[in-house]
Each structure stands twice: as C-alpha cells, then as structure tokens.
Amino acid sequence: MAIIASRADLFPENIADVKRAGHRLQSIDAIARADLRSTEALICLLSDRIDAAVLHRAPQLRVVANVAVGYENIDVDAATERGIHVTNTPDVLTESTADHTLALLLAAARRIVEADTAVREGRFPTWGLQQALSGIDVHGKTLGIVGMGRIGAAVARRARHGFGMSILYHARAPKPDVENGLDARYMSLEQLLASSDFVSLHVPFTPETHHLFDALAFERMKSSAILINVARGAVVDEAALAQALQTGQIAGAGLDVYEDEPNVHPELLKLKKHVVLAPHLGSATEETRRAMADLAIRNVLAVLAGKPPLTPVPPPSTHEQPKM
C-alpha cells in the first residue's frame, strides 16, 4: 500500500479507484505544511510550488501528478535527478479551454458583461442606431493566434469554421498540418500584431515568454484590437496592458489568467468598456475537471504499479522554449 497525498479535491470515483488499487489517499491543505515523509505519490495543482525543498521532504516520492497542462510550478530538473516522474493532464482540457477563449472574445467584443450589469441596475439602454453598448463585429474579422499548439488549433477551428474569421498565427515554426483546412497563415509576431483584429495567447510560460506582451507589443497592435489571454498571466505585462487600454492604444481585453493570482492589477479592475475579467476558468467545466482528475489518478496508479506514466512531461533537455 502506498500513500498518495493530494492537494486536489478529487471526485468520488477517483477516491474509489485509489482504494481499489489498494492505496491510501491523504488529503492535504497546504504542501508547505504537509508531512510528506511517507508519501510515494503527490497530486498537486498549478498553484502549488513543488521545488527542490518540497521534494527533499518526500524521500519516498515516486511521482508528482500536476492537474494541469502547464508544469512551470514544478522543478522538473530536481525531480528528474531524483528519479521522480512528473506528469500533467494534456488533451483532456483542450476543447473546453478553446470554448472559453471564444466566450471571452465574444463577451469582450459585444460588451456582454457591461450589458448584463446595465440591465440588472435598471439602465436598459434606449434603442438607437448609435446605441449605447454597441460592440465590435467578430464574424469575418482576423484572429491572430500566438502559440499554435492543441488549444490554439482548437480555437482556430472554431473561429474559422464558426465565424468565418481569417487566421494568422505565430509559433516556433510553421505548422502545415494546422494550416490545411483553415487557410491559416504563419507570420512573425510583429506582422501578426499589426494585422489582427483579435489576438489570442496560447503559449506556455517560460523565461522567453515572460512579459512577451509589453508596451511595445501593444504599440504594434491595431487601436481597434482586442487581446485574449487564457495562457499564463505572466505572459502579459499587466501594467502596460492597463495603460494601453486606458489610452485607447488597443480597444479591449478578455483575461482569464493573471501574473499574481488571485490578485489582479488594480488598474485593470477599473476598466469596463470591452474588458472582461474571469477567474481562471479555462478548464472549469464539470466534465473536463473530472477528466483531468481521472488522468492524474491514472498516471499515479501506473507509476505505483511499476508502469510508465501515461502523460509524462518532457525531460528537462527537451523542454519547449518557444521562439517569439
């Protein structure tokens, strides 16, 4: 019997799977305060920092299962040196996150949150050709996707086939397989920013992508453009974004992630027109969260049974470093 420590609020079926396998599940509130001396498997969330010090406190640890696609919260190098497997939950959240991306894009463009607030506060606008709360068209516009991985490609399919949008993208290298059927065009980041009506971010957080979207990036965007970020908060310089929105350098933003979650830059909180702020809900559907938990558990049980994990993260020597 192995001890599995979990920071995730697992579903009943996950707990049953652990018991069936003959292991013991230990729920922990905070990894920093948890006794990990006998722990052989650790299930963690993106908000948990799993560094060398945490790994040192868990001498029996065999696997760290991150319930997320990204894994920048884990010191993979330190884990690899110890022979500890690190896993994530790719694929299962792709479609729901792509749905959420389009939801933010539409909400920001059509000012849905502002309109909902107006109705609830008894400020139903008078109808007119130049009506208050008029938005921005989405259909037929140009969408620039930065980072054309699984989620970026899923967003592109929705935008192209659902809204007839033209697709531009920037990634580490051209992706002909994605371009086929979408009429997507690969270009430099500078060209994409100058040409896109909407810019959607889908890159991992790395030293290279930290504040990739800074004051210069916003200067290169159209004044009518809207930025969407469901990737990682630190990819965007929030102070520069707030300034760009306040001065009309760009038209709007739909944000799901923030650099210092759960804190949001105070200047962003003041903005309402064409600005939508969501609390990191990209994968937050019951179906997707159950699939994520299930995959994390299956990774853990595989390793504890002496088998390879289903979705291991790449070893340190092959970690992706997107060239932007």
Image (cartoon, rainbow, N blue to C red):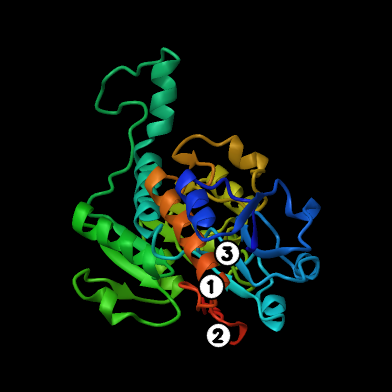
Image point (55%, 66%), residue name: 300
- Front-most of residues 168 and 284: 284
Disc ID at residue 305: 1
Disc ID at residue 318: 2
- Front-most of residues 134 and 49: 49
Q: Mark 3 = which residue?
A: 65
- Callout 2, which amino acid? Thr
- Callout 1, which amino acid? Ala
Horizontal side of 180 relative to 70 (left or right) equals left
User: How far apart, in angstroms, are the residues tagged by discs 2 and 1?
Assistant: 26 Å
Residue 224 shows in the view: no
Image point (26%, 20%), residue name: 127
Q: Which of disc 1 and disc 2 is earlier in sequence?
A: 1
**Dots 2 and 3: beta carbons under 8 Å?**
no
Horizontal side of 316 relative to 295 (left or right) equals right
Q: Position of residue 192 (x, y in %)?
A: 40, 68
Tell me which corner region of the image, top left, top right, bottom left or bottom right, holds residue 87. Answer: bottom right
Q: Position of residue 257 (x, y in %)?
A: 55, 51
